[in-house]
Amino acid sequence: MSDPTLDKLPGGFKGMSTDMGSDQTAFKGVNWGKAMMWIFLLSDTFIFSCFLISYMKVRASVVDPWPYPSEVFALEFMGAPVPLLLIAIMTFVLITSSGTMALAVKYGYEKNKKMCGMFVLLTAIGGLTFVGMQAFEWSKLIFHEGVRPWTNPFGAEQFGAFFFMITGFHGTHVSIGVIFLFIFARKVFKGDFDTGKRGFFTTMKSDYVAIEILGLYWHFVDLVWVFIFAFFYLW
Amino acid sequence: MAEAKKEQTTTHKIGIYLWIWGLLFVLSFFSYMVDWFNFQGLLRWTLILLFMFLKAGLIMAFFMHLFWERYALVNVLLWPMTAIACFVGLMVAEGKYTVFSRMFYFFVGGA
């Protein structure tokens, strides 16, 4: 950190024990909103872990064969089925939006209004593309393949329930993120973070740190997708 | 006081973000290739988990700035995640036991 008062504090585990035992703010140099976002993300990690762990446990113990994701999620391209094509594109779109968000946070630090707002907007568009492709994937599975939470034509019946629950919960997170990205893009372009205008829900002054907090949420959504991609689609 | 003082924030060179971004692309491409070449068994699992943890680590360390945070915050986040890893281990064992008992009573029979 560039904060000179923080540089004087001991680092590493010694720093951790002095920070925690300082009878003051435990997370030194961390904005309270950022600390709260981290706590929220940690609790969200528990929820997603519970979903993925129950999925793993059921998949490991069903007697029927589990649907083979490579074929279930294949997409016709030039007359031949390409395995996981749509999922791969979705992954790249989400990583791209994570990268633009990282740049938005960087320009937010530098109080570069134009670049920051542009990258927040790009991130929102990336997220919207992702949700759109997920809607396409769901409608394909529901209307063309006849996948339901209680049955599906490929194998073990539990597949649908886990697929809709896990990707649906992730998709909800992406959708909420997209809404907030659009709201914050507007706030950046309006210059609320430069003038310190007070927010709609809060009496606190607007600050570019909000972009970093939003960035944490967005990177978390990308992070969860990394795990879903590995455990749901590649397994 | 930390709250009263104007929030001091770090700014990093753009290069580091672009590097991590590129690495994430390459790692995602690699994990897609695991499916493309249809690797199976232990090799598939090793590669999937390797690429997954590398990607997760890069995102958390650099995009989410944990690499630059003080240990007080980092440890508050990482130890509960270690507990989750233990939970995964427990449930793997549990899943093996469930499928064993299902197979046993389906094919060998109880009573």
Image (cartoon, coloured by chain):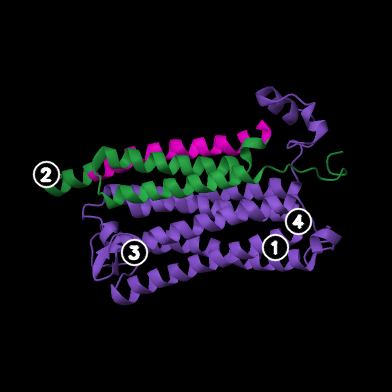
Chain colours: A purple, B green
- The chain identifier of the residue carrying mark 4 reads A
- Disc 1 crowd rating (10 Å Cα; few below 14, some 14-19, many 20+) is many
Q: CA distance from mark 2 to mark 3?
A: 30 Å
Residue A191 spot, x, y in % from top left: 80, 64
What's the residue type where badge 1 is placed?
Gly
Q: In the visual, does B31 lie left or right of A1?
A: left
Q: Please, which residue is most extreme toward the front here?
A: B15
Point out the frontmost of discs 2 and 3. 3
Q: CA distance from mark 1 to mark 4?
A: 8 Å
Q: Please, which residue is most extreme toward the left here?
A: B108
Label 2 in the same subunit as label 1: no
Q: Secondary structure at mark 4?
A: loop
Q: Is residue A66 visible?
A: yes
Can you identify the residue that label 1 sits on? Answer: A117
Label 2 in the same subunit as label 4: no
Q: Secondary structure at mark 2?
A: helix
What's the residue type where badge 4 is placed?
Asn
Quadrant of the frame with the N terminus of chain A: top right
What's the residue type where badge 3 is placed?
Gly
Q: Quadrant of residue A71?
A: bottom left
At a point 50% along the width and 35% down the height, the residue shown is: B82
Can you identify the residue that label 2 sits on? Answer: B108
Can you identify the residue that label 4 sits on? Answer: A112
Q: Secondary structure at mark 3?
A: helix
What's the residue type where badge 2 is placed?
Val
Can you identify the residue that label 3 sits on? Answer: A160
